[in-house]
Image (cartoon, coloured by chain):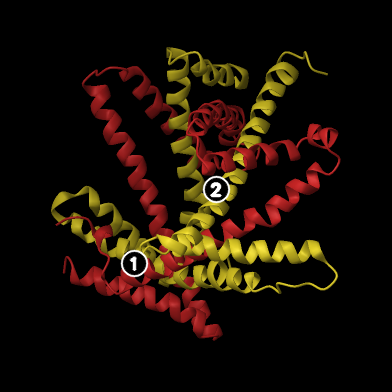
Amino acid sequence: MGAFLTLGIISFLYKDNPWYKFCEALFVGISAGYWFCTVFWSQFVAKLWDNIYPTAGQPRQYVYLVGGILGLMMLLRLVPKIGWFSRWPLAFVVGGTAGAYLIGYALSNGMKQVKSTILPLWVSGNLNATVGNIILVVGTFCGLIYFFFSKEQKGTYGKVAKLGIFFLMITFGASFGYTVMARMSLLIGRMDFLFGTWLGLIK
Amino acid sequence: MRKEVPLIITFLAGAFFIADYFIPHTGFSDLAAKINGWAIIVLAASYILGVLNILRINYGRVAKREKDWILKLILVLCMFFMLGAGIFGGITEGTLFDWFFVNTFTPMQATMFALLAFYIASAAFRAFRVRTVQAALLAITAVLVMIGRVPIGETIWKSFPDFTEWIMNVPQLAGKRAILIGAALGAIATGLKVITGLERTYMGQD
């Protein structure tokens, strides 16, 4: 079955065809079912059901019913007349996520990165580290200048921003290289499955 | 009720989770964990909406016998099959659900992602035809990183892997830090706008 489906998906490289379309429909259906069941057991049952009907000896935590009620309110979106009630749980999730992420991002992506970039520009007896630190500090600064759109990027300021773009391009290039490598690795894995596991041509 | 209450809820929820970072009290952390549990339950409920939406869209097409209706029917049947197998039979190893996951979902997902290698290569070729210094930098870095990560890189030049490592740790990291710091500033600004009610697009239209 794995080989049939793998070949069906690969057949798209030739052109869109019924075999691929069949596999695609199968994939979407199975994905939807898979993700729903995973969420059902790991979130719905674990957080709601198990807290209200815990194993023997554990106290019932009815406070989680609030989450259940908010979840039900979310489903009211399907009823046009009272669909606006679904804004309440949505507002709760959006607000909570904004609050949690605000501090989380400020700490991990903001403070931590700034702290790591404050480096000595002269490392005694280590030219490699000196050059590396200078490039790192200058590159980060120029990259940030590029993201600052409140001032027109021309003159010296524009040149600094342009240098920032060069560093960003190196970052995108490296990410691109990694992505291609990861995809190639997956492709090799599928070929290994087809020619090794399935056909037995690779020992 | 339609606008004011959601704005108040957004503010209270946002302020509560911010306060959680500043109040190192066990009771408060426990309460935050419970309220976080509510959010997880709400998100789980949104998956029900997703499934119902798939059903709504495809049911109409099957009922009207639109083009490719058979495929839509297959999609819905597969979804129900997995739902039935997962909810009634469980999702642990050795179940029917797990068997279908390993033998259908996994190979198809891996192949889908593997196919992207071809499309990425094609897109890259088109992108690199734009002859600018930036495009050249992107292409050269990508090629160097790729060669440095495979055995042939070391065969060409012994220090190739070290050179790739230097690219990753110095110029690449500089750009990455600029992006991360910029994204953090953006997230803080957007978060504050959401909490204070300046950003309301998530509520949709009246």
Residue pointed to by mark 1: A92
Query: Residue B12 lies in what quarter of the image?
Result: bottom left
Q: Position of residue A116 (x, y in %)?
A: 65, 70
Among the chains pictured, the one given red colouring is B
Q: On the rendered structure, is A175 left or right of A74?
A: right
Which chain does the residue under circle 1 lie in?
A
Give the position of the N terminus of chain B as an image quadrant: bottom left
Disc 2 element:
helix
Q: Nearer the viewer, residue B53 or B204?
A: B204
Q: Write the residue at 46% across / 66% down.
A: B37
Q: Residue at x 53, y 53 (%)?
A: A42
Instruction: Tell me the kind of residue under disc 2.
Output: Met
- How far across and down, in percent of the image, does residue B156 sit? 82, 33
With respect to residue B73, does B82 lie above or below?
below
Quarter occupied by residue B50: top left
Q: Nearer the viewer, mark 2 or mark 1?
A: 2
Count the marks: how many? 2
Distance between mark 2 and mark 1 Cα atoms: 38 Å
The residue at the point 54 percent across, 86 percent down is: B25
Q: B99 or B65: nearer the eye?
A: B65
Residue A169 shows which numbered tag?
2
Question: Dividing the image into 4 quarters, which one contains the C terminus of chain B?
Answer: bottom left
Is B206 left or right of B174, judged from the image as shown? left
Q: Numbered disc 2: what chain?
A: A
- Chain letter for the part of the structure drawn in yellow: A
